[in-house]
């Protein structure tokens, strides 16, 4: 049987290491051993050979020898083996590298069962251990692996592998440093604070700005009309006025913000435009329904002229007679809302434009015909405590309706779209609604839960429309001409907003009003849960989550003498309609974002910060451990299948690293210096690499 020319005592058909398969076997091996150097010769001297095991073993070895020689001649064919097998060998190589077994320990515990000598006979077996020596491997030209077009050859150069290892270590080090820096910064400047500051900036393209610029269609307008059910009996003096609430008639109020300008002083100027759109799918009542209603032009003009001269009143009586005007009219709901116009009103506007400035008194038409207002609000991180509070309304800090500033000031109020962040329970919300002709205060009432978040409910106090002596703070809403005859408690004069037409605001059904209001008519049933006003605000973000603003418009008919056809309406306050502006909620994407910011983010950011810091520390430890424990060069698997299973290699500093690869199911130690190793194709003979 042939023996290995490089390592005496190891048979060629069993080991095939370092080109052993091409060694001269069966003859004198002294020359080869001498060429291998004194370290190889010394190693060969400690190898023991095993005795022959019979003809069956010899036959198997002959067959193995043929296979090895076939592999040498057809090395390229072996390269076409499956990539899956190569990957499996790579895994074996990695696992064995981590074991870190040393050559010295293997040598001290291994033995060779065969008989070694020059011209070893057939039947000898491969030793389990072959001596370790220092052999400098010459670099070889890499081959291109056939089959799948991947680069192969006898092996991969040490330098290329070393560069990849160094790049990997650098990447881990940089990642660890960045992770620690981000973790520390996220504790100093938390994501929650950054998010809240970005909201204050109202940056174009971000959710806060886009949601405000095009608010979701979540505000519903419900209008209830008071139908007079006993008109003839009332006018004849037989019965008190009886009214019946008819509704709701449901509209959607659409809000648009245009002409948006970011000012240099930390404010934002825009034009708010509101419109109302009827929703047939949500209504059970028709706008074509016919109702008996007060004649607003007749009763309104008569009330306005209550203190006019005798001649003026006589002229007005002649005017009413020419049109046969009656104090009660029957009309459709749609006309009452949008198209309240008749020949008498049109003629009055032509003759007395100072008295009748419009020719359409439809109640919703009057509200929305010119619902465009220029508003300037505070924004920016420096205005967190007054975020989106009004700086100027229509270019002024005042409304321009009332004589005294406390009642006329608009600065510091809100239109209800947004409120300052981090609200407290002591904060007073100032709500500006154009239809109310004033700013109304809302005070904290209770905590509520909405969408899994804690929210504050602010209520409008029941005395908000009371200008009686009991509430002197509201005395500035009393105009000079009306001080002689004060309105009953629960009513607020809003005529300055409607061309001085005698209109008073109140809670629906005169809730909280004077008893005289209830004694003058029938059909009123005030109820706080149905007729009160409130807003529910998430206190951290200041976003309103739900609101109901309810108010009633009433026609004030003063005591009039000398004007006919007003009949029993003289000195009466007649309810016309009441409306509810209801923000029914928030779109799911806004409420979800709020939940993340308010509930999840404050807790999550602490966990993420700690994880980032620990991750960075861990990566740096891995880098330090790798620098001290990872060899400078990493041995790559040889593409051939006849390379030894186990390799123990010497480091330049004396350390050792082992890679196990079975040689006929037996571990073999090859004499290659780790630091200078370049694996060569199996077709290279041992004499060439020596």
Image (cartoon, rainbow, N blue to C red):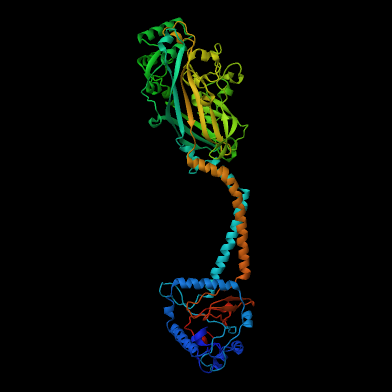
Nearer to the camera, 328 or 556: 328
Q: Give residue 689's position: percent from left, percent from top.
A: 52, 84
Q: Can residue 18 be seen in the rendering of this structure?
A: no
Does residue 195 lie above or below 303 as drawn? below
Q: Quadrant of residue 599?
A: top right
**Residue for point 45% across, 28% down:** 221
Q: Quadrant of residue 384?
A: top right
In the displayed structure, 432 sits above or below 358; it is below
x%, y% of residue 208? 51, 41
Residue 594, compared with residue 613, is above or below; it is: above
Residue 118, image x and y in percent? 55, 94
Viewport quadrant of the C terminus: bottom right
Taking the image as drawn, is residue 537 in sight? yes
Picture coordinates of residue 299 (x, y %)? Answer: 43, 13
Locate residue 29 relative to residue 145 in the image: left or right: right
State the residue in front, 581 or 472: 581
Hey, which quadrant is residue 455 in on the image?
top right
Left or right of 352? Residue 477 is right
Count how many numbered circles sit on residues in the image: 0
In the image, taking residue 562 as reference, residue 137 lies left or right, namely: right
513 to 609, vertically: above or below: above
């Amino acid at each position: 049987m042939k023996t290995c020319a490089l390592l005496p005592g190891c048979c060629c058909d069993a080991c095939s290491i370092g080109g052993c398969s091409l060694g001269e076997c069966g003859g004198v091996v002294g020359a080869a051993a001498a060429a291998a150097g004194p370290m190889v010769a010394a190693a060969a001297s400690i190898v023991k050979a095993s005795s022959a095991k019979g003809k069956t073993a010899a036959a198997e070895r002959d067959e193995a020898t043929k296979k090895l020689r076939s592999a040498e001649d057809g090395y390229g064919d072996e390269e076409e083996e499956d990539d899956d097998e190569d990957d499996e060998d790579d895994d074996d190589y990695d696992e064995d590298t981590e074991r870190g077994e040393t050559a010295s320990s293997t040598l001290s515990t291994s033995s060779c069962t065969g008989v070694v000598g020059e011209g070893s006979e057939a039947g000898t077996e491969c030793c389990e251990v072959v001596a370790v020596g220092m052999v400098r491997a010459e670099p070889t030209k890499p081959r291109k692996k056939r089959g799948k077009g991947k680069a192969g050859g006898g092996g991969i150069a040490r330098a290329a592998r070393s560069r990849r290892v160094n790049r990997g270590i650098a990447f881990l080090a940089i990642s660890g440093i960045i992770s620690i820096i981000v973790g520390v910064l996220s504790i100093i400047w938390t994501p929650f604070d950054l998010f809240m500051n970005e909201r204050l900036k109202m940056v174009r393209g971000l959710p806060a700005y886009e949601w405000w610029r095009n608010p979701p269609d979540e505000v519903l307008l419900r209008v209830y009309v008071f139908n007079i059910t006993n008109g003839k009996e009332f006018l004849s003096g037989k019965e008190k006025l009886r009214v019946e609430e008819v509704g709701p008639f449901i509209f959607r109020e659409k809000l648009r913000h245009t002409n948006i300008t970011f000012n240099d002083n930390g404010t934002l100027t825009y034009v708010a435009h509101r419109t109302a759109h009827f929703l047939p799918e949500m209504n059970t009542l028709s706008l074509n329904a016919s109702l008996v209603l007060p004649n607003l032009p007749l009763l309104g003009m008569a009330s306005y002229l209550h203190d006019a001269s005798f001649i003026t009143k006589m002229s007005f009586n002649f005017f009413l007679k020419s049109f046969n005007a009656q104090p009660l009219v029957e009309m459709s709901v749609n006309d009452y809302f949008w198209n309240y116009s008749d020949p008498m009103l049109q003629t009055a506007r032509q003759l007395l434009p100072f008295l009748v400035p419009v020719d359409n008194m439809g109640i919703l038409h009057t509200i929305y015909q010119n619902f465009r207002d220029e508003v300037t609000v505070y924004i920016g991180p420096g205005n967190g405590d007054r975020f989106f509070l009004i700086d100027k309304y229509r270019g002024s800090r005042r409304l321009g309706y009332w004589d005294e500033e406390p009642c006329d000031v608009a600065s510091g109020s809100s239109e209800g779209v947004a409120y300052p962040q981090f609200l407290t329970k002591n904060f007073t919300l100032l709500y500006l609604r154009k239809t109310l002709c004033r700013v109304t205060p809302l005070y904290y009432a209770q905590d509520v839960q909405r969408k899994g978040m804690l929210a504050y409910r602010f209520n409008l106090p029941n005395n908000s429309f009371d200008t009686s002596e009991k509430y002197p703070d509201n005395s500035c809403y009393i105009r000079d001409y009306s001080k002689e005859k004060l309105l009953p408690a629960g009513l607020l004069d809003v005529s300055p907003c409607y061309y001085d037409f005698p209109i008073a605001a109140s809670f629906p059904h005169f809730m909280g009003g004077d008893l005289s209001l209830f004694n003058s008519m029938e059909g009123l049933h005030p109820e706080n849960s149905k007729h009160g006003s409130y807003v529910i605000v998430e206190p951290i973000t200041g976003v309103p989550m739900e609101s109901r603003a309810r108010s009633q418009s009433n026609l004030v008919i003063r005591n009039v003498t000398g004007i006919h056809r007003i009949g029993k309406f003289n000195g009466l306050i007649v309810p016309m309609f009441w409306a509810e502006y209801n923000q029914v909620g928030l779109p799911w994407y806004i409420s979800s974002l709020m939940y993340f910011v308010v509930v999840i983010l404050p807790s999550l950011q602490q966990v993420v910060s700690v994880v980032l810091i620990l991750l960075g520390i861990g990566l740096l430890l891995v880098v330090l451990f790798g620098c001290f424990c990872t060899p400078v060069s990493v041995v790559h698997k040889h593409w051939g299948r006849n390379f030894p299973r186990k390799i123990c290699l010497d480091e330049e500093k004396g350390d050792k690293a082992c890679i196990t690869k079975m040689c006929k199911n037996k571990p073999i130690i090859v004499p290659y210096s780790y630091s200078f190793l370049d694996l060569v194709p199996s077709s290279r003979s041992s004499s060439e690499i020596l």
